[in-house]
């Protein structure tokens, strides 16, 4: 059982796109500091260090912020992929991997455009399904792991 959530619907169900969030600004700062360090190291061999540093230091924040924003945008636009393994379900979104052990899933039910998993603590999570996926294959694999179908 492996699928990718429909991209447009997946994008709509995630956090709002924000280039000034705490995580993005932290990333901008770290990349800027990295490029400042690289500039200082590369300019140490120059005779007039301060003059060259003053002329080229503007590159560090430009590259730092640009790189951080591009990486954030690519991560934000990446699709959600769902896969199953021997120990449970795996949800992958860019560099974020979430594992859901089979033992925590008590039941499941199909909805119009997705599947809802109910956990042993009565919480639920919904995954979107593409239109062309075979729901019977998903049901067979879930039943093979002793997960029962929820009755509405």
Image (cartoon, grey):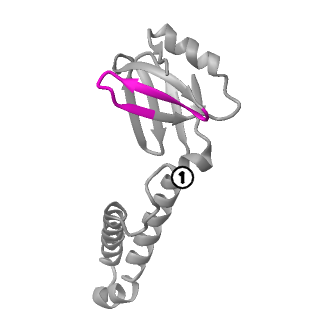
Q: How many marks?
A: 1
- Left or right: where 136 falls relative to 87: right
Q: Quadrant of residue 87?
A: top left
Task: Please provide percent x and percent y for residue 67.
Answer: 46, 66
Q: Residue at x 47, y 21 (%)?
A: 108
Q: Quadrant of residue 64?
A: bottom left
Q: Residue at x 43, y 68 (%)?
A: 19
Task: Please provide percent x and percent y for residue 85.
Answer: 47, 20
Q: Residues within 10 Å of mark 1 (few under 14, many from 20)?
A: few
Residue 119 in the image: above or below residue 50: above
Q: Is residue 123 magenta?
A: yes
Residue 25 in the image: above or below residue 5: below
Task: Please provide percent x and percent y for residue 134.
Answer: 67, 22
Viewer-closest of 97 and 141: 141
Res 78 seen here: no
Residue 94 in the image: above or below residue 143: below
Q: Residue at x 47, y 37 (%)?
A: 92
Q: Which residue is mark 1?
A: 12
Segment tinted magenta in the rendering: 112-125
Residue 14 in the image: above or below residue 56: above
Q: Is residue 139 magenta?
A: no
In which quadrant is the N terminus drawn? top right
Secondary element under disc 1, as helix, strand or loop, is helix
């Amino acid at each position: 059982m492996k699928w990718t959530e429909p991209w447009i619907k997946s994008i709509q169900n995630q956090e709002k796109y924000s280039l000034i969030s705490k995580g993005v600004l932290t990333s901008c700062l770290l990349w800027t500091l990295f490029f400042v360090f690289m500039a200082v190291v590369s300019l140490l061999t120059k005779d007039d260090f301060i003059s060259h540093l003053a002329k080229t230091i503007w590159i560090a924040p430009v590259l730092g912020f640009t790189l951080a924003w591009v990486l954030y945008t690519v991560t934000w636009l990446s699709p959600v992929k769902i896969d199953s393994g021997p120990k449970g379900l795996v949800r992958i979104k860019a560099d974020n991997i979430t594992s859901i052990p089979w033992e925590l899933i008590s039941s499941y039910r199909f909805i119009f455009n997705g599947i809802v998993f109910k956990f042993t603590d009565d919480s639920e999570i919904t995954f979107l399904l593409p239109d062309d996926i075979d729901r019977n294959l998903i049901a067979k694999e879930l039943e093979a792991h002793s997960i029962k179908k929820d009755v509405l």
